[in-house]
Amino acid sequence: MFLRFSLTAASIALALAVSTAAFAAPQAKKELTPQQQRMADCSKQATGKKGDERKAFMSSCLKGEAAAPAKMTQQEKMKACNADPKAKSLKGDDRKKFMSSCLSGSAAASP
């Protein structure tokens, strides 16, 4: 009986020692596959994007497509068109025509 208890205690101690040694050994950093690296890079670039915008970005990024330029909001377009030096010298109908074509994305209307 004492022998059986000793063997059981010894096997438990051995198992504990082996498992402790396995966890104590430093793990080598696993190299990422090219797909995993691309996923990590795209995910880092997608920081701040949410929902459908993130899905669309990740899809195009993972396919290797160049990111499409972000669309300007109406407010950003107004600011850009008003900053145009041409707009500052125009008045009345000429300014309206210029702003209309600028905001629609057409070539700037000449006065």
Image: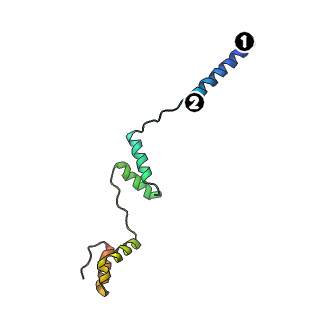
Residue 89 x, y percent position in the rendering:
29, 83
In front here: 54 or 40?
Answer: 40
- Outermost left residue: 110
Instruction: Point out the image quarter for the C terminus.
Output: bottom left
| Helix, strand or loop for disc 2 | helix
The alpha-carbon separation of the residues under discs 1 and 2 comes to 31 Å
- Of the numbered discs 1 and 2, the one sitting upstream in the chain is 1
At 64% from the left edge and 25% from the top edge, which residue is drawn? 16
Q: Is residue 39 above or below residue 88?
A: above
Residue 70 location (% of width, % of height): 37, 62
Decide: is 93 above or below 108.
below
Residue at the (42%, 46%) spot, across then down: 39
> Residue sitting at 28 percent across and 84 percent down?
94
* Circle nearer the viewer, 1 or 2: 2
Is 61 positioned to the left or the right of 19 in the image?
left
**x%, y% of residue 22?**
56, 27
Q: Amino acid at mark 2?
A: Ala
Tag shown at residue 3: 1
Label ID, residue 64: none
Which residue bears the numbered disc 2? 24
The residue under label 1 is which amino acid type? Leu
Q: Do we see residue 1 in this rendering?
A: no
